[in-house]
Amino acid sequence: MAEALRVGIAGLGTVGASVARVLRDKGAELTRQCGREIVVTAVSARDRSRDRGVDLSGAQWFDDPIELAEKADIDVFIELIGGDEGAARACVRAALDAGRHVVTANKALLAKHGVALAEVAEKKGVLLNYEAAVAGGIPVIKTMREAMAGNSVNRVFGILNGTCNYILTRMEAEGLTFEACLADAQRLGYAEADPTFDIEGNDTAHKLAILTSLAFGSKIAADDIYLEGISNITQADIRAAAELGYRIKLLGVAQRTESGIEQRVHPTMVPTASVIAQVHGVTNAVAIETDILGELLLSGPGAGGNATASAVVGDIADIAKSRPGFQHGPVFGRPAKELKPYKKAQMRSHAGGYFIRLTVHDRIGVFAAIAKRMADNDISLESIVQHANGTEGGIAQKTVILVTHETTEAAVRKAVDGVTKDGHLTDKPQVIRIERAG
């Protein structure tokens, strides 16, 4: 049997402790599968005294994760610290420079510095594995990087944030407000005390940027993503979507267009009968559309200690199975130096159907003015629904819901801006894209 694979773990929070426990509890099985033992020989965390539910007394302790990366007697460095700068970036770079394999769950780090780190890994001939960085326990990175040879990806999209999916699921199922569902998500540990990164779409954007690079062979461009969160979704939107046969999901979508690559994160209406509409709670799902395979949908636990630890351990096992002299594949599916510059598509030219909700004065001529604005912008309407809202503050109001046939983002925005300028609205307009989904 080959020599044991020596592992160093930097960061012993929920995920790090789970990884250590899985490596201990499943040690015999992993040895059989990998042909060698996997041993945690070094660790680093802020608090030595904390009980993490796993015996780490046999591992060398480092207060500084960079020192662990540089000096510990290890073959693989596991980064579970988090953050796109500081210690996380420095220790990953140090481990790669030292010729050590790296496994990370750090999507923010990869979204910002992934290409540069990939170049170092490929130059040193070591692996940089990151399955846990996108969609938790779902093996989407391995699938795209290894199992789809010969396929050209046309579009990749999915539910990539469990917090947002949990909130939208509860809003629909129980008729609760966004604020109530967010508070419950925080109580249950699904959302942070400051949930902005999740609910405004940033977390999804980091994951989408990584998938975009894998899908299209482009450099990661996390700053070139159209971004819109779910904090403005109301019960009125949830109910209207259900009446029209749709369900609202926060999707990350990347696709080729004639003008470049389009990356967008925003609330989306998907047909209730579609597979992705059936993904509820904290579950994640990723759909990949290719020329050979067609559409593949991967779904499963997107977050949590066990799901993320499963992905990390899978990456470690892949390294354990490799042997000296083995030529490792490129980090992002193509050599890092051959990744193409990202060419951003014109987002406002995006074509598709749209849901438009307008709260307007309930008076003669309003609907005719709305219809004229739509016609002036060549927008064809698939359906129109009107609801009387009663009187508020002495003003009679109604809700007008429009579903368009395929049109452009620019046309919809121009029409809605025109209705706003006409002075007919009593509240902010809502525009939600309708996505073709499997």
Image (cartoon, rainbow, N blue to C red):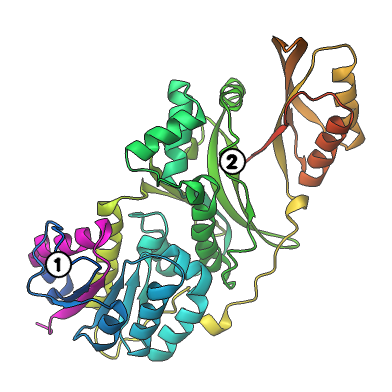
Q: Which residues are magenta?
A: 1-29
Residue 295 appears in the picture as rendered: no
Amino acid type of the residue tagged 1 in the rendering: Leu
Is 280 drawn above or below residue 197 in the view shown? above
Say what secondary structure mark 1 lies in. helix
- Please report the residue visible at 14 percent of the width from the left and 63 percent of the height from the top: 49
Is 208 drawn above or below residue 325 in the view shown? above
Q: Nearer the viewer, residue 65 or 113?
A: 65
Horizontal side of 41 relative to 360 (left or right) equals left
Q: Nearer the viewer, residue 164 or 124?
A: 164
Amino acid type of the residue tagged 2 in the rendering: Pro
Quadrant of residue 50 in the image?
bottom left
Q: Are marks 2 and 1 in contact (CB under 8 Å)?
A: no
Task: Tell me, for residue 388, which label it has, or none.
Answer: none
Q: Which residue is mark 1?
A: 30
Q: Position of residue 165 (x, y in %)?
A: 45, 39
